[in-house]
Amino acid sequence: MKLIDVIDVYLARQRSLGMRFESAGRLLHHFGRAVGERQIREVTPESVIDFLNGDKGLTATWALKHRVLSGLFRFAISRGYVDHSPLPAVLPNLPPQQTPYVYSTEELRRLLEATSTLRTGYSQHVPAMYRTMILLLYGTGMRIGEALRLTLQDVDLVEEVITIHCTKFFKTRLVPIGPKLSGELAAHLERRGLLPMPQGKAAPLFASRGIRGWTYQSVVTMFQHVRRAAGIERPIGEPRPPRLHDLRHTAAVHRVVAWYQSGQDVQRLLPQLATFLGHIDIRSTQRYLQMTPELLEAASQRFAKYAMEGSHEE
């Protein structure tokens, strides 16, 4: 079989099992185009290495590509399309994953102000809409892809709740929103209504020209413009600058700090935070809680208060 045909069969199988496989599908089709029109048995280790390395060599994306291609070739071997995998058996030493960045409240304010710089090179609606997206990501902790898939009908301002369909784990969840974010979304919906909406309430929540929704790559690119304008630079020792995705980490850390400062039972509330973020278990949530100075200080003050409340000796 041709490589591209095997890719299509593999993707169809994965999706029949309930997997969305959108990003993996794009990556595999990119691989098919890079290798060219050839039989899957003709795919050489050299062509695989060229694809894995890309133009930038060893990056964190290398491991993602390797994982996706491994799934494809395990499937191909199980179906008898090939006898062995052309992927390298020994993995190189890859650079460490990027350390999540937790924005301060001052940096968040500067990011919001810097969205005004998107007036240049974008439609007139972009600055205000992008400001709303930043507030939405921070206020709800939702994933970027989840925000981009939202439609107008997913936002219920009466009940102050957002419905997120087809999450990372193929479940639907309800995310409550506070009055401030609700007011921001109300203004956003009013602006959104000025654009063409042939799909009606099924139209994407974020779209510059009304028809096609924003793409992941476009909002990530816009964020780097905003970040630079806000004067938020690459942390010392980090090879890459802070990301839009880091707003999700920031939301989690700020929520836990607020719980500590208000004297809440953090251990009892962490499962609720996991549900809020759409995690399947608390271990996933704990990875988001980077030990920032603010979090350490809040935890230390809580422990000191506990220690001073009286003798805890048996």
Image (cartoon, rainbow, N blue to C red):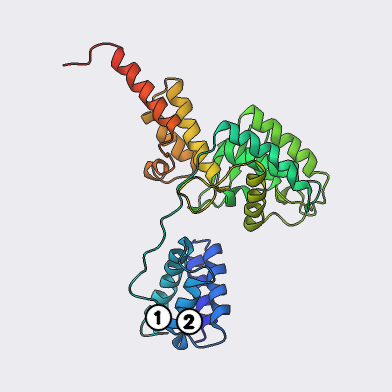
Residue 93, image quadrant: bottom left
Residue 175, image quadrant: top right
Is the residue 80 above or below the residue 90 in the image? below
Query: As drawn, is 142 to the left or to the right of 266?
Result: right
Helix, strand or loop at label 2? It is helix
Residue pictured at 53% horizontal, 88% vertical: 38
Query: As drawn, is 191 to the left or to the right of 266?
Result: right
| Of 34 and 72, the residue lying toward us | 34
What residue is pinned by disc 2? 47
Residue pictured at 46% horizontal, 28% vertical: 257
| Of 160 and 115, the residue lying toward us | 115
Residue 312, image quadrant: top left
Q: Which quarter of the rendered picture does the C terminus lie within?
A: top left
Q: Can you give x and y, in whole percent of width and height, for residue 262 in the image?
A: 46, 20
Q: Can you give x and y, in whole percent of width and height, for residue 12 in the image?
A: 52, 71
- Amino acid type, label 1: Pro
Q: Residue furthest top?
A: 310
Badge 1: residue crowd in 10 Å (few <14, some 14–19, many ≥20)? many
Query: As drawn, is 68 to the left or to the right of 114?
Result: left
- Amino acid type, label 2: Ser
Q: Residue furthest left?
A: 314
Residue pictured at 67% horizontal, 49% vertical: 225
Using the image, tell me which numbered label, if any, was put on residue 270.
Answer: none
Is the residue 64 above or below the residue 270 in the image? below
| Of 127 and 173, the residue lying toward us | 127
What residue is pinned by disc 1? 86
